[in-house]
């Protein structure tokens, strides 16, 4: 199985950014642990602060890879273009969030991408990514 972990804007600052909400662990440290847990899965990690670069990456893997675990950051709440990109590919996308967006400001309650994704996981800290991987494995059967 080939799975892309795709992080959007400001998620390069994990570990430093609002640690009370997102924790104090850097993502690359977590990613190493995640990949070791699934030795039979081929992972790639890509992060961009630029919407168009995220869309290009979705197009690149979206017709041949088995799944995408996507934390679109704040673009979750704004991006019709990401929704269209997800609708345009065959690869299933699991939307994940570290925080429980529904416990936070009202503008975070609305996702522009959920309707195009296979499912949504939020509120489990970095473990949301592992749960996203588990969802893709379960879907593959
Ligand atoms: C986030 C939640 C978003 O509302 C926020 O803009 C982020 C991170 C999360 O993982 O909890 O950047 O996607």
Image (spheres, grey):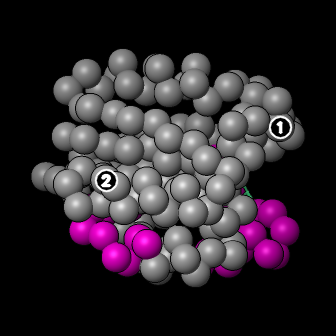
Please give left or right for residue 138 compared with residue 18 in the image. left
Q: Nearer the viewer, residue 42 or 21?
A: 42
State the residue at coordinates (68%, 51%).
49
Please give left or right for residue 67 compared with residue 73 in the image. left
Upstream in sequence: badge 2 or badge 1: 1
The label shown at residue 61 is 2
- Pointers 2 and 1 in contact (C-beta within 8 Å): no
Q: Where is 119 relative to 133, above or below?
A: below
State the residue at coordinates (47%, 20%).
32
Q: Position of residue 97 (x, y in %)?
A: 61, 53
Task: Tell which quarter ligand 1 is in.
Answer: bottom right
Q: Is residue 63 visible?
A: yes
Residue with the mark numbered 1: 17
Instruction: Give SS at disc 1.
Output: loop
State the residue at coordinates (75%, 28%).
15
Q: Position of residue 33 (x, y in %)?
A: 46, 20
Instruction: Give SS at disc 2.
Output: helix
Q: Nearer the viewer, residue 35 or 4?
A: 4
Which stretch appears magenta?
A: 85-112
Image label count: 2
Cα gap from disc 2 to disc 1, whole angstroms: 29 Å
Q: Where is 140 relative to 11, above or below?
A: below
Q: Nearer the viewer, residue 73 or 59?
A: 59
Confirm if mark 2 falls within 8 A of ligand 1: no
Q: Is residue 96 visible?
A: no
Q: Position of residue 50 (x, y in %)?
A: 65, 56
């Amino acid at each position: 199985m080939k799975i892309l972990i795709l992080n959007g804007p400001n998620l390069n600052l994990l570990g430093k950014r609002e640690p009370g909400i997102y924790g104090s662990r850097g993502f690359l440290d977590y990613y190493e642990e995640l990949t070791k847990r699934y030795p039979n899965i081929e992972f790639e990690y890509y992060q961009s602060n630029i919407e168009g670069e995220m869309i290009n990456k979705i197009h690149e893997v979206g017709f041949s890879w088995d799944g995408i675990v996507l934390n679109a950051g704040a673009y979750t709440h704004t991006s019709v273009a990401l929704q269209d990109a997800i609708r345009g590919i065959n690869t299933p996308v699991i939307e994940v969030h570290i925080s429980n967006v529904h416990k936070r400001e009202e503008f975070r309650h609305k996702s522009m991408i959920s309707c195009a994704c296979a499912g949504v996981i939020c509120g489990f800290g970095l473990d949301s990514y592992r749960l996203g991987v588990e969802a893709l494995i379960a879907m593959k059967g």
